[in-house]
Image: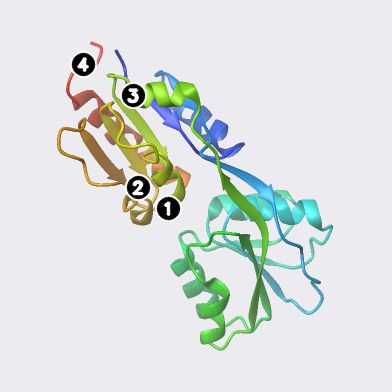
Amino acid sequence: MPPTVLITRPEPYGAEFAALLRAAPGGDVPVILSPALVIEAAGALPGLDGYHWLIFTSRSGVRQFVALSERRDIPVYAVGDATAQEARGAGMRAISCSGDAGDLLSRIRADGVRGPMLHLRGEHAAANVAGALRDAGIPADEAVIYAQRRAPLSAEARACLDGSAPVIAPVFSPRSAAALFADGPPRAPLVVLAISAAAAARVPERAHGAAAQTVIVAERPDAAAMLRAWPAALSAAYRLEGTMRPQ
């Protein structure tokens, strides 16, 4: 029996990643979509007059901004390529920092930006971007414009984790990694493909007597790196006990 891929990424991003996997070598395996987080509007957009730059650290932030405002004239610093492309697709001029919050802050400081800047973010943030910029002498504010609400895994997802066939679980955030284990350790042999070390850190140590477990961390915190790590995750799943790769 081939491994099953369990994707807990919020929609529409989970379905997008599933389509990329299906087009990749070895991607003809069962896929279950069960978002562990649901993105909802939250907070209010502040007045934008006086801000010279917007900062986005997620595609969801861009999408929510586009839904709240018709302004497309303020240039954008985006944490990575996908977020920058989302902003460009909405008609904004965007600079990609091609990495994580640390890369974003380094690029802004290196560019000599004077601000004021506005970070539009979700309720849960991996880093205090605005605070770090202020510490560097760059005027910056932040506003929460969306939230990520926890959602229970579907019955199909739970059955998959409680089964005997190996499961490959790509996780795109620490919170979605934690959701895999919210109801206790899975019984199925598990390969966690983590987007970052922070996400991998939310995977608990394998308990005594629990099923085999492997954690693979992408080389960069983006979907492209997750896809590059896919062959390693697939090979690890086939190496787990009780699974044989088709000849």
Q: Amino acid at mark 1?
A: Pro
Secondary element type, mark 4: loop
Q: Percent position (x, y) of residue 71?
A: 82, 62
Mark found first going from the N terminus, 3 or 4: 3
**Residue under circle 1?**
221
Left or right: 205 in relation to 119: left
Q: Of all residues shown, which one is farthest toward the right?
A: 70
Cα separation, mark 1 vs mark 3, equals 29 Å
Mark whose residue sits in front, 3 or 2: 3
Cα separation, mark 1 vs mark 4, equals 30 Å
Residue at image location 49% in from the left, 32% down from the top: 153
* Total labels drawn: 4
Mark found first going from the N terminus, 1 or 3: 3
**Residue under circle 2?**
218
Q: Amino acid at mark 4?
A: Met
Question: Which disc number belongs to residue 162?
Answer: 3
**Residue under circle 4?**
244
Cα separation, mark 1 vs mark 2, equals 7 Å
Q: Quadrant of the C terminus?
A: top left
**Disc 1 crowd, CA 10 A, few/some/many (<14, 14-19, 20+):** many
**Disc 3 crowd, CA 10 A, few/some/many (<14, 14-19, 20+):** some
Residue 215 occupies quadrant? top left
Q: Amino acid at mark 2?
A: Ala
Q: From where the camera sits, is residue 239 visible?
A: yes
Q: Percent position (x, y) of residue 207?
A: 20, 40
Secondary element type, mark 1: loop
Mark found first going from the N terminus, 4 or 2: 2
Q: Percent position (x, y) of residue 232?
A: 27, 35
Cα separation, mark 3 vs mark 4, equals 19 Å
Secondary element type, mark 2: loop
